[in-house]
Image: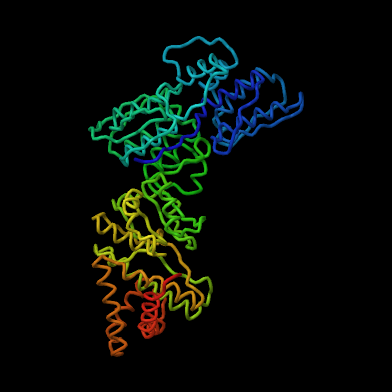
Amino acid sequence: MYKGITLPISKSIANRILLLQAIHGDPLMRVSSDMPDDVIVLHDALMALRAHKKDEPLTLYLKNCGTALRFLQVHLAKCYPGEPITLTGDPRLIERDGKPTSQTTSARILHGENIPVEPNESPYITMSRKIAEAYPNVSLEADWSAAAFWYEYVAIHGGELMIEGLNPDSLQGDKIVADIYSKYFGVTTTFTPTGAVVNKGASAMHQLCILDFSNTPDLFPPIALTCERLGIELQATGIENLRHKESDRIEAVRLREVRNDHRMAMSLMCADFPVSIEEQACIAKSYPNFVPQHITPIKGVNDDNLGKKHALSKLIHAATSEYVWLHDDDVVLPEAVNVQSDKVQCTKADLIILPLRMESLYDKPSLLERLQIAEYAAIQELTMRSAKRGKAVMCSGANLIVKREVWLECEKDLLPEIPSGDDMFLLEAIKRRGYKIGVIDEPAYTAIVRPLTSWKAFFKQRMRWAGKAPKYTDLDIIRCGRLVAFANVLQLICPLIILIKFPIEWSLIKAREPQTKWYMALLLEIVYPFYLLICLIGGLFRKSW
């Protein structure tokens, strides 16, 4: 089971509490950077109003926060009539400044107006009534609107999540998301004292989803994209006002576009549609700490001097994602680390081998650097070819994706007494258990590594690599290693064997580094047997690193 998902506070409840605090002259609740922008914007505006001096001009910038705009329009009319106070914001907010909404009615109720209850009243208005009646005994709650994205995620990807803080007796109308996903998508909810366990069961899904979103408009994007991903027809009513939200959400869903809309960004990400880093910035409006679960970059930190393997273990145990993306500290990360990717899900693999490319920092690399670049190209091409043929013999922890649960199962086989090899021993353990190994061999997933710049560092690294060879148990890896060793020893005995070896090595290098000069590859081929022999002997007899 996954570790708990932490939700933001309900901005609907928090903003109503803030307005009541302002109305009653009570201290305003504290806000922090992990709270939704909507709450922070309203808080800061109310604080500015408290510091306002009568008859002095004041402009309040509200970003794209519609709730703050509606609440403050009523609040200014009630408490600051005739004052030279201007409300402004992003262009989209100014476009939305039209007819009164349920937020306007809510603000009037919070100010004490006696507004009769109407049939089919909006849950947001009902919430305002209850909060006004119970003030100051109302508690903040986890946000059910934000939980909707995790329901979407589980419906599409399966599995189980523990969502912390969800309350079945919530004041929020969006708690109906649990019933909707149970009825139409086979996602069950089991409440516990600390939250809700959300699980994709085996029950059959409906082929037609008929819903009225009049009272739950925020649920439209995640439900619409869930239906699209699962091939379910959606008949939606009550969505007319969605054209006047942070974006035209009807059009944004149709075109699968973010349009600077926080709910669109999260809905698209959970449904595996690409959302750029720049587009993800708007998520802070309601859910600053939102992180898609099935890919999380993770970097080991050896902060207790117990070694890389221990650092990896600590962080993978602490991770909450389905997959962890491993990389070394000194690599240049591929762009794909920062985006949602359905390619990872499509592999349906437990370990995904990703490419590396060696590049020098200098326009004119040294001889040592050029030899390393050529060698690395051959190694990478052999790595990818063997993995694609179902006979993986190498992988690199510098760029690797693994299922967290699989890594945890294999952890005891990673030989912590050996200072490196977590990647290769992981590969062996996964093959031994029959898990699936996948490959994504594309530029967008390629990490960049740098060549070593001194011969001492170079031989030390290669000896460390060679030192773990006697511990290998996988037959494919052992056979590959023996073949390489035999071919190079044979070249020392009979130098003419290079006429057979060089075309093979050259084809591997050219496939990865087409700009490599033939004479550099030939030089590598000539010196390689000597270098290999030095590293093997040094690696086998050196006791510490």
- Seen at 41% across and 50% down, the residue is 316
In the figure, 198 relative to 503: above or below?
A: above
Residue 257 shown left or right of residue 403 in the figure: right
What quarter of the picture does the N terminus occupy?
top left
Residue 68 image-quadrant placement: top right
Q: Position of residue 45 (x, y in %)?
A: 65, 30
Residue 482 image-quadrant placement: bottom left
Residue 254 shown left or right of residue 113 in the figure: left
- Seen at 40% across and 49% down, the residue is 295
Residue 115 shown left or right of residue 520 in the figure: right
In the figure, 481 relative to 242: above or below?
A: below
Residue 120 image-quadrant placement: top left
Q: Position of residue 380 (x, y in %)?
A: 36, 69
Q: Position of residue 539 (x, y in %)?
A: 39, 74
**Relative depth, front residue between 374 and 215:** 374
Q: What is the total number of numbered labels drawn onto the structure image? A: 0
**Relative depth, front residue between 159 and 303:** 303
Give the image's coloring scheme: rainbow
In the figure, 95 relative to 102: above or below?
A: below
In the figure, 214 relative to 438: above or below?
A: above
> Residue farthest to the front?
543
Q: Position of residue 175 (x, y in %)?
A: 40, 25
